[in-house]
């Protein structure tokens, strides 16, 4: 039997796909708890495949602890900064992810945060629930309109392109983007304008982050970058928490250096910097940008397909190591 361990429950479609194979012995951590490295090693020891989430830190210690029979780490996410790729490569262990599937879901959530921040949706909801709404007031919870404004996208990959499409076609927004590479699709379809990071920060009304977490993108947005933004700017992050220096963000929001922020990921996840919790001009969601029924189902299927291919000595569908 080929043992497979799933570090936390995922959509049943992928699980059922794996269970169709009589040669697969599938075990799932159904507790809902994030396993420590020691617990993960103990539960997954002897497995040929493991399914991991972003909360599972997979390094040489874990890989060696599970055993030399391990063939694949299938990450239930687009990102893979939780996995030591070099350690996996040295041990001839495949690593896969679930790209493209959640593109639309994340782009929609980024736009939802832009809308909610601009129109102060959460503040309005709290205002009504607290019994403060007594009469219509002309200056109550004012915010900016979105139509025709400038949307700055940092990282014009698939998600950035999807967000640009929503902004351009849905709201007639002008699209700026900062990326090491020219994006011909964005240039052609959205009349997008590629700018340096500093130029984008200075000229954008709304700024959305869509870059991977690398050494070069850690604290990409910090005090200096926040000061370059318009005081009316709204900053959104659905990528990775450490791309923003949260202490600097909290200070900028408190001092009204920018209008608002919408954050789905946190620098020290799951807890945001304490000061952020006290501010009204930020909307925080618990890493749910990809949380649609469609995305989760497709992610689980792709995770299962990668495992099936590798355990049958065939190439993985979405290998991270071969990119």
Image (spheres, rainbow, N blue to C red):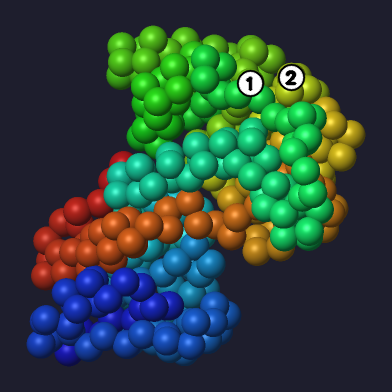
Which residue extends farthest right? 255
Left or right of residue 131: residue 122: left
The x and y percentages for residue 183 are 37, 19
Which residue shows up at 60% across the image and 24% down it?
Answer: 145
Q: Please report contact status of discs 2 and 1: CB closer than 8 Å, yes or no.
A: yes
Looking at the picture, tell me which residue is in the foreground, 191 or 143.
143
Which residue shows up at 62% across the image and 18% down it?
Answer: 204
Q: Residues within 10 Å of mark 1 (few under 14, many from 20)?
A: many
Which residue shows up at 42% across the image and 85% down it?
Answer: 29
Q: Is residue 99 above or below residue 52?
A: above
* Residue 166 visible (yes or no): yes
Choose top left, top right, bottom left or bottom right for residue 25: bottom left
Looking at the picture, tell me which residue is in the foreground, 157 or 62.
157
Q: Is residue 88 above or below residue 281?
A: below
Q: Is residue 246 above or below residue 206?
A: below
Tell me the quadrant of the picture where the C terminus can be found: top left
Badge 2 element: loop
Badge 1 element: loop
The x and y percentages for residue 250 are 81, 43
Q: CA distance from mark 2 to mark 1?
A: 7 Å
The x and y percentages for residue 43 are 43, 88
Q: Residue 205, which numbered label?
A: 1
Q: Indicate which disc, 2 or 1, sits on the residue closer to the N terminus.
A: 1
Choose top left, top right, bottom left or bottom right for residue 223: top right
Label total for image: 2
Q: Residues within 10 Å of mark 2 (few under 14, many from 20)?
A: some
Which residue shows up at 64% across the image and 45% down it?
Answer: 121
The x and y percentages for residue 303 are 27, 64
Left or right of residue 43: residue 37: right
Left or right of residue 101: residue 122: right
* Residue 175 visible (yes or no): no
Q: Residue 230, which numbered label?
A: 2
């Amino acid at each position: 039997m080929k043992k497979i361990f799933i570090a936390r429950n995922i959509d049943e479609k992928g699980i059922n796909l794996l269970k169709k194979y009589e040669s697969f012995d599938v075990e799932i951590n159904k507790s809902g708890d994030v396993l420590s490295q020691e617990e993960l090693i103990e539960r997954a020891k002897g497995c040929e495949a493991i399914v991991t989430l972003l909360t599972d830190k997979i390094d040489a210690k874990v890989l060696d602890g599970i055993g030399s029979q391990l063939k694949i780490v299938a990450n239930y996410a687009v990102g893979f900064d939780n996995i030591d790729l070099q350690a996996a490569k040295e041990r001839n262990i495949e690593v896969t992810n679930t790209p493209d599937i959640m593109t639309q879901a994340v782009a929609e959530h980024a736009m939802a945060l832009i809308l909610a921040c601009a129109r102060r949706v959460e503040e309005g909801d709290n205002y009504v629930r607290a019994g403060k709404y007594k009469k219509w007031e002309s200056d109550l919870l004012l915010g900016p309109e979105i139509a025709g404004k400038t949307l700055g996208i940092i990282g014009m990959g698939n998600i950035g392109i999807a967000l640009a499409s929503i902004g351009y076609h849905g709201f007639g927004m002008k699209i700026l983007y900062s990326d090491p590479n020219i994006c011909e699709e964005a240039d052609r379809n959205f009349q997008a304008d590629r700018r340096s990071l500093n130029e984008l920060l200075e000229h954008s009304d709304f700024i959305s982050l869509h870059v991977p977490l690398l050494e070069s993108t850690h604290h990409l947005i910090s005090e200096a970058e926040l000061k370059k933004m318009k005081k009316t700017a709204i900053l959104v992050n659905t990528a990775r928490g450490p791309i923003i220096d949260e202490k600097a963000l909290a200070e900028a929001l408190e001092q009204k250096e920018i209008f608002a922020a919408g954050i789905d990921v946190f620098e020290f996840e799951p807890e945001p910097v304490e000061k952020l919790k006290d501010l009204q001009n930020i909307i925080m969601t618990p890493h749910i940008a990809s949380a649609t029924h469609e995305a989760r189902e497709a992610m689980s299927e792709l995770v299962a397909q990668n495992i099936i291919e590798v355990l049958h000595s065939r190439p993985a569908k979405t290998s991270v190591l071969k990119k």
